[in-house]
Image (cartoon, rainbow, N blue to C red):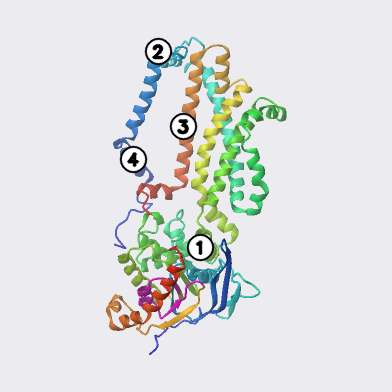
Amino acid sequence: MANGPRASAAEVGAWAMLMYRISGWLRSPTPYLMLAGFAAFFGAWFLLSEVFRVWRFASLPGPRAVLLEWFNPNPVYGMSLYTPDYYMHVWMSLRRVLYAFVISTGLGVPFGLFLGWSKVFREFTFPVFETLRPIPVLAWVPLAIVMFKGDETPVIFLTTLASFYATALNTMLGVQSIDESYPRAAACLGASKWQIFRHVIIPGALPFMFTGLQISVGVAWFSLVAAEMVSGEYGLGYLINSSYVNVQYPVIIIGMISVGIVGYASSALVRLAGDYLMQWRVRELALGGAR
Amino acid sequence: MNAPAPMASKGAIRIQNVDKVYLAREGAVQAVSDCSRDIRPGEFCMIVGPSGCGKTTLLNAIAGFHDITGGAIYLDSEMLCGPERPKAEPGPDRVVVFQNGALFPWKTNLDNVTFGPVVQGKMTRAEASEKARGMMADAGLAGVEHNYPGEISSGMRRRVEIVRALMNDPKVLLLDEPFRALDSLTKSVMHEALLEIYYKNKVTIFFITHDLEEAIFLGHRVAIMTTRPCKPKKLLEVDIPHPRNYSVLTSPRFRELMEETVSAVHEEAVKAFEAGEKEM
């Protein structure tokens, strides 16, 4: 059996692998359960708000009203897929999240790696970190406005903050999760401290790191909308808040659903990037986690 | 009639009056006490004792993962650890094969095997790959070079790990119950594979196990250790000539040696059990 035929990395192309996974996915109950879930959600919303007009739900715009407005070339409240303003809001939010994500990853990953790697560094910084972490983003709003000039920077600062915590904390846990025999094996094989960091600590922490990054994008959207409600003149959070002030209820929901879709897509992108960087894990899982 | 040790000019280990005390919740624990042992260059040396008896502590001291609190350990004429330097420096002259396996799951088998010479700067990646392919083929590992460790069987993973160690031309190979997690059939295949690798590479082997049959089958000499604190209880010369294969297991001499030692091992196992040492 030792020399039996075995598909190697080079032989199984990435494309064939992808097609195989898609066809497997289509044959599994997963996509149908997902569709059923969405149908149940929208159905319930529709029945409650538009058909039976149940108590408290009557004042809520129903899915039909929202969709009609969203896909309307001449929207009643001036906001739909046909108006450039809508894309401006989406784009501004997306850009802020992108900046915040890049900054929080650029700072959070190295910070988390050193937190996990160096006991001295951890003891020096972790208590401060843990004290700052529970302070909610909204509590930072006044300081952010005082500290940063303009409309953009305070919003980006607020969006970065919570993402940074999620990334740093998970990266630290990732380093601590590494079985001690890996750095020991590397030391036995003659690796220097720096080489151990490069070849063992960083790749060993990747799975947790990417969990952190997925939480981080989610949290970024979360804080972004809060920050945009307070400051700025564009963005989905701003759109939601101004529609409330102007009593344009369907637009609120258009803004909310847009955040949901763009947020879902961005964490899916992070997951894909993770799969790309962790081929070893993808393949292990594809084998049913045979270990 | 002495078991012939294979020719090797390097890799003599001298363990001299080694003590190891560490602090645990229940106070100071004497893991190793006044342990002395001479291992000849190129010897296949088996260390047998019940689980948790302190054998691994000894291995960790040689490898340089832990310090010792007394005595000294020498490799050839060089002192690894001793009174002035309680903790040895880990290095590629003494490579460990770990109990649960420590192939880097994020590197392909080939990148695992080439890791040592490449990080030490002794070979370029291309040179190391060439040598690695040859050694992997010799160990029956052709075709899995570009797979990740998670994609191959546990027996193959063990072999990859042993090849990864041998790529460094170590003086000593330290094996910590390497086949413990394998089923008995895979284990028997691995024993023969290990012997084959051993015959091809002149290296001293320090092999920890709690399996007496495995110890007598593989080793030139079997050191039976007492449990907590760990020190030599009985030294058995296995006078069955190498090269060996599985037919040895049914030979009368093998049975005799088993009978001679099984009670000594059993006695320690009972002591360990009564002391409440949990199976680790």
**What are the residue bounds of the magenta stretch?**
B206-228
Pointer 2 or 1: first along the chain: 2
Q: Amino acid at mark 3?
A: Ala
x and y, in percent, of residue B46 in the image: 43, 76
Q: Between A222 and B139, which is closer to the camera in this rendering?
A: A222
Distance, label 3 to label 2, CA atoms, is: 29 Å
Residue A185: numbered disc: 1
Q: Residue furthest right?
A: A146
Residue B138: within the magenta? no
Of the residues tagged 2 and 1, which is closer to the observer? 2
- The verdict on a common chain for dots 3 and 2 is yes
Question: What crowding class fits label 3: few (fewer than 14 Cα within 10 Å), some (14-19), or many (20 or more)?
Answer: few
Placement of A72 over or under B278, stated as above or below: above
Residue A265: numbered disc: 3
Pointer 1 or 4: first along the chain: 4
Residue B139 picture quarter: bottom left
